[in-house]
Amino acid sequence: MRLSLIRRLAKDERGISAVEFALLAPVLIAFYMGLSEFCQGYMAQKRMGHVASMVADLVAQKDTVTTADLTDVFSIGGLIMKPFPTTTLKQRVTSVTRTGTQAKVDWSRGDGMEARPKDEVVTLPADLLEDGQSIIMAEATYDYESPADYLMPGLTRFSHTYYLRPRTSDKTVCTGC
């Protein structure tokens, strides 16, 4: 009697798909959650990079900016980050001029980030500026905290620096910086 029961169970294929589903479902759900989390982090990183390029672009379009103008530009940066929270977004824009072999800060303004001191020596990528040329350097950092914490660690810091030459003059001047 036992032998016939074992033979009958060995030939029965009715539960195979349920067993396969039970084995594959957790793996597929974990893969989906990880991919979703990765895409959210990637989107936050891309938006933060767009903030840096936008800040440099808006400042480089003007001959002269004021601290109020820069405050407005930084607030636009916060709007670009939506729907992500902007509490950990930090921005800084700096005008740098190369004199001789050194690149020095003309003026700097930050939002959540310290402004660079005037005449601070800045390290720029090689061959970016020739002697006497000026550049706008926009920096942004963003601390991304994943809502799910499956794939990415609890806190990931993204940062980006963007360089752009002033468009309408040789140097962008900031009054009140």
Image (spheres, rainbow, N blue to C red):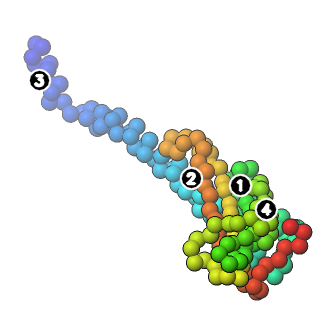
**C-alpha gap between disc 2 and disc 4:** 33 Å
Viewer-side residue, 82 vs 10: 82
**Callout 3–callout 1 Cβ contact below 8 Å:** no
**What's the amino acid at mark 1?**
Leu
Q: Which secondary structure lies at badge 1?
A: strand
Judge from the rendering whether residue 70 lies leftward or rightward of residue 145; answer left or right.
Answer: right
The label on residue 41 is 2
**Closer to us: mark 2 or mark 4?**
4
Q: Which residue is mark 4?
A: 117
Q: Is residue 4 above or below residue 132?
A: above
Which badge, 2 or 3, is on the more N-terminal residue? 3
Quadrant position of residue 63: bottom right
Circle 1 residue: 89
Where's the N terminus, which quadrant?
top left
Q: Amino acid at mark 2?
A: Gly
The earlier-in-sequence mark between 3 and 1 is 3
